[in-house]
């Protein structure tokens, strides 16, 4: 099995760096509170007074401990957001935030990166997955080619089929224009959750969509019925 995830040095930096930063912030909390009390232009000294009056050394110890815990929470969140790719002869598993998505080897016909996204294409030219990823393309390429998968160094084999979406495009399947219209609004707002959900709705209609500079480009999968 080949596994691609966060580089070890980066993981060490995250797990040591955020707790250490939290500890430093906790250590500096009392001096900051004292500085606020000594500064006349700070309008409200209430919270600063509470912090400055905490019994020592337990006040500092407590602040450092809280800072470390918060740093660990941030590190856990950062670790969960990283895409992990596991590849073997039976299939591909993509993991993010503890959620696994597995695709059988026989269902994958092309794999490539599109900017900062990893894309898996299926047998009917549908996109099985399009995942945000900061993983190095050369590491991904090595993992997939080592296991005999169709890695496309030249990018999307269907890129020439995409066309820019315009409202009420007549060649789209019924209902797709409404979804793309809603997705255009989500794209303007930067609503990532809506964008992902509406992409899935389009996939059910046999439409693949990709975004570029807040514009949507679409193509139909093989066998999809046009409007």
Image: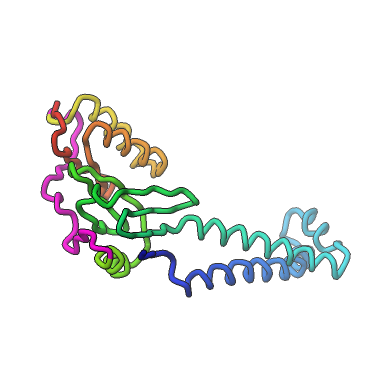
Instruction: Locate residue 7, reporting x and y percent.
Output: 43, 70
Compare residues 52 and 171 and report the one nearer the observer. Answer: 171
Q: Is 222 positioned to the left or the right of 94 in the image?
A: left
Instruction: Locate residue 45, reporting x and y percent.
Output: 78, 56
Compare residues 66 and 118 and report the one nearer the observer. Answer: 118
Magenta highlight: main SS: loop
Instruction: Classify residue 162 by image quadrant.
Output: top left
Display coloring: rainbow
Q: Is residue 179 above or below residue 95?
A: above
Q: Which residue, as the protein is rendered here, is positioned at the far bottom?
A: 9
Instruction: Classify residue 224 by image quadrant.
Output: top left
Residue occupying the point 47% across, 72% down: 8
Q: Which residue, as the protein is rendered here, is positioned at the far right?
A: 55
Q: Is 225 positioned to the left or the right of 36 in the image?
A: left
Query: Does the magenta-highlighted stretch encompass residue 177?
Result: no
Instruction: Classify residue 206 by image quadrant.
Output: top left
Instruction: Locate residue 143, reporting x and y percent.
Output: 31, 66
Q: Is residue 194 above or below residue 152?
A: above
Residue occupying the point 62% across, 63% down: 71
Query: Does the magenta-highlighted stretch encompass residue 157?
Result: yes
Q: How many marks?
A: 0
Q: Looking at the rendering, in which quadrant would you find the N terminus?
A: bottom left
Residue occupying the point 43% across, 53% down: 95
Compare residues 200 and 148 and report the one nearer the observer. Answer: 148
Instruction: Locate residue 89, reporting x and y percent.
Output: 30, 58
Residue occupying the point 57% across, 68% down: 15
Q: Looking at the rendering, in which quadrant would you find the C terminus?
A: top left
Question: Bounds of the magenta span?
Answer: 147-170
């Amino acid at each position: 099995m080949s596994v691609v995830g966060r580089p070890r040095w980066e993981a060490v930096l995250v797990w040591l760096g955020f707790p250490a930063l939290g500890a430093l912030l906790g250590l500096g909390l009392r001096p900051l509170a004292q500085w606020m009390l000594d500064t006349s232009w700070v309008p409200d000294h209430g919270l600063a007074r509470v912090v400055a009056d905490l019994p020592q050394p337990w006040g500092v110890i407590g602040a450092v401990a809280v800072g470390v815990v918060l740093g660990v929470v941030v590190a856990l969140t950062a670790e969960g957001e990283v895409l992990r790719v596991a590849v073997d002869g039976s299939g591909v598993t993509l993991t993010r935030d503890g959620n696994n998505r597995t695709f059988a080897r026989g269902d994958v016909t092309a794999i490539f990166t599109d900017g900062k996204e990893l894309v898996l294409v299926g047998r009917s030219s549908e996109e099985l997955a399009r995942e945000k990823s900061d993983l190095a393309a050369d590491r991904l390429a090595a993992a997939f080619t080592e296991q005999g998968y169709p890695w496309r160094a030249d990018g999307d084999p269907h890129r020439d089929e995409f066309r820019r979406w315009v409202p009420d495009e007549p060649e789209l399947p019924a209902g797709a224009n409404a979804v793309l219209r809603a997705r255009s609004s989500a794209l303007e707002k930067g609503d990532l959750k809506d964008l992902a959900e509406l992409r899935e709705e389009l996939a059910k209609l046999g439409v693949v969509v990709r975004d570029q500079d807040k514009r949507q480009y679409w193509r139909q999968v093989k066998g999809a019925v046009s409007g």
